[in-house]
Image (cartoon, rainbow, N blue to C red):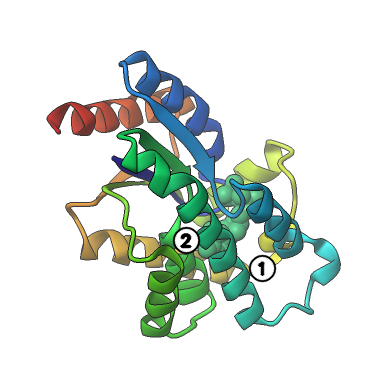
Amino acid sequence: MFITLEGPDGSGKTSQMQPLAEAIRAAGYDLVVTREPGGTPIGDEVRQVIMDLNHKGQMHPTTEILLFQASRAQLVNEVIRPALAAGVVVLCDRYADSTLAYQGYGHQTDLATLRRIVEFATGGLTPDLTLLLDIDVEAGLRRRAEDGGQWNRMDAYQLEFHRRVRAGYHELAAQEPARWVTVDADRDPAAIQADLQRIVLERLQGR
Ligand code: TYD
């Protein structure tokens, strides 16, 4: 089973990953935990290029889109597909939906084109379950600043951009209600974690 976590910047996604992973393992499942961009040695190098503040304002949007797909293609083929083939559960912090939400809805790149490029990068591999950590844009960015989180090139875009990303996630979730589960992320982290564990374990046990 392939599970992804999605959400706007500051949704607290990354800090929810480890306790969720521990709960899945404690329930007796073999698990691989990974993230995008990155998750492989090659992907981590691509991540550095994407995030580098020195490239601010210089990286062409098409370059950025293709770098995300390069990292993803490597992750799918080196990590995700082999794990799934071995019956291992995969939990990934961001995946193809981030490209649709950020580059598609956020930067308003043609969605049909993006879907084709994503399909090429992933070979059509789609998550079985996608958890959306949903949070108001201002609350999310505030939380990220308070956490002293790394302020990278991707955060520097306008508020409007982040609003489009969030609305994009809502649309994607509405298009595939069987795959997406939306969780209110503007709450106590322990309450969010409890919801995530319940949803994931129910799905795993239902299989
Ligand atoms: P990261 O520091 O991993 O942020 P987060 O903790 O929010 O996941 O940075 C990833 C950034 O890259 C984030 O702003 C989302 C963006 N992104 C895209 O724009 N497109 C993509 O396809 C992916 C995977 C990420």
Residue 183: image location, x then y, percent: 33, 41
Position of residue 48 in the picture relative to residue 12 (left or right): right
Disc 2 secondary structure class: helix
The CA distance from mark 1 to mark 2 is 15 Å
Instruction: Give the residue furthest to the right.
Output: 54
**Nearer-the-camera pick, 188 or 92:** 92
**Where, by quadrant of the figure, is residue 170 drawn?**
bottom left
Q: Quadrant of the C terminus?
A: top left
How many numbered dots are placed on residues in this image?
A: 2
Q: Relative to 88, is 92 above or below?
A: below
Q: Marks 1 and 2: which is nearer the front?
A: 2
Residue 201: image location, x then y, percent: 25, 26
Split into quadrants, the picture shows ligand 1 in the one at bottom right
Position of residue 142 in the picture relative to residue 204 (left or right): right
Which label was assigned to residue 98? 2
The CB of the residue at mark 2 lies under 8 Å from ligand 1: yes
Disc 1 secondary structure class: loop
Residue 149: image location, x then y, percent: 71, 41
**Where, by quadrant of the figure, is residue 171 drawn?**
bottom left
Q: Amino acid at mark 1?
A: Tyr
- Give me the residue at 21% from left, 60% from top: 176
**Nearer-the-camera pick, 122 or 139:** 122
Q: Is residue 134 visible?
A: no
Residue at mark 1: 157
Position of residue 172 in the picture relative to residue 68 (left or right): left
Q: Residues within 10 Å of mark 2 (few under 14, many from 20)?
A: many
- Give me the residue at 86% from left, 66% from top: 54
Q: Is residue 156 visible?
A: yes
- Give me the residue at 52% from left, 73% from top: 103
Q: Amino acid at mark 2?
A: Ser
